[in-house]
Image (spheres, grey):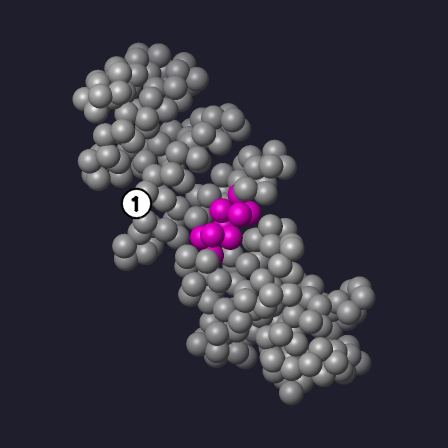
């Protein structure tokens, strides 16, 4: 129905192709295209490219989204994430932010985290380090929300964020992250990580001209490294 197509379009958000809508509603592309064209004729949607559509006004999308019940919306977000992967398998890095959004809203935390990391990978390769840091911190937040988060993945992401903060000269942010990382590593008894994050904290303090504090953290890093046989 046109109502179903309109609701799917609203939950997809932004611009979308008829093939995406067809995949989500499990109908032939021609059928989805006819419904989309009818909605264009009613002034609700507008063509934005070849077989591409968007809402004629953002307020329309907001109103339509509000008519979708919560559980149905979650199911739609999951289906849209899967549709993106099926329709655009060669463009997932470019679409990583949208995929992360749909999987997060659809309750698929692990897939959302995977795509946040992919978005960060792409931004880092483009030298957009601040954006990469932001996506990795969101991935960390989502990991921490899990009942039994993957501790090794958390520690690895903490390490990567701190390293990016060095490169971006986001020193205050790096210090904030490394303190969380140290707390986790100490709580888990991961001495190798404690030594590494202590070293990072010393380096951050040195970059910030906090030399006395930096020396204390360098010494702690050496002591912990010795205790695990890594002088």
Using the image, determine if residue 154 lies above or below residue 197: below
The residue labelled by disc 1 is 151
Residue closest to the eye, 211 or 19: 19
The quadrant in which residue 28 appears is bottom right
Local secondary structure at mark 1: helix
Q: Residue at x 24, y 34 (%)?
A: 190
In the current view of this chain or complex, which residue is farthest to the front?
A: 229
Q: Main secondary structure of the magenta part?
A: helix
Q: Residue at x 44, y 48 (%)?
A: 138
Mark yes or no: residue 59 visible. Answer: no
Which segment is the magenta one? 112-120
How dense is the environment of label 1, judged by Cα within 10 Å: few (below 14), some, or many (20 and up)? Answer: some
Q: Residue at x 44, y 35 (%)?
A: 160
Please say whether residue 121 is one of the residues in the magenta stretch: no
Residue 79 pos. (x, y %) = 53, 71
Residue 181 pos. (x, y %) = 32, 36
């Amino acid at each position: 129905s046109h109502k179903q197509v309109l609701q799917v379009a609203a939950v997809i958000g932004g611009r979308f192709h008829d093939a995406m809508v067809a995949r989500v509603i499990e109908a032939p592309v021609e059928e989805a295209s006819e419904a989309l064209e009818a909605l264009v004729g009613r002034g609700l949607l507008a063509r934005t490219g070849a077989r591409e559509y968007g809402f004629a006004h953002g307020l329309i999308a907001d109103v339509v989204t509000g008519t979708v019940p919560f559980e149905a919306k979650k199911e739609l977000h999951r289906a849209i994430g899967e549709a993106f992967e099926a329709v655009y398998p060669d463009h997932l890095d470019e679409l990583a932010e949208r995929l992360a959004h749909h999987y997060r809203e659809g309750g698929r935390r692990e897939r959302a985290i995977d795509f946040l990391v992919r978005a960060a990978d792409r931004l880092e390769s483009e030298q957009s380090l601040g954006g990469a840091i932001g996506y990795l911190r969101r991935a960390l937040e989502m990991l921490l929300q899990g009942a039994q988060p993957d501790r090794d993945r958390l520690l690895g992401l903490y390490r990567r964020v701190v390293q990016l903060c060095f490169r971006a000269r986001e020193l205050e942010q790096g210090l904030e992250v490394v303190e969380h990382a140290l707390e986790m590593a100490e709580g888990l008894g991961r001495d190798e990580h404690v030594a590494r994050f202590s070293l990072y904290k010393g380096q951050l303090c040195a970059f910030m001209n906090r030399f006395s504090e930096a020396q204390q953290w360098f010494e702690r890093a050496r002591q912990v490294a010795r205790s695990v046989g890594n002088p």
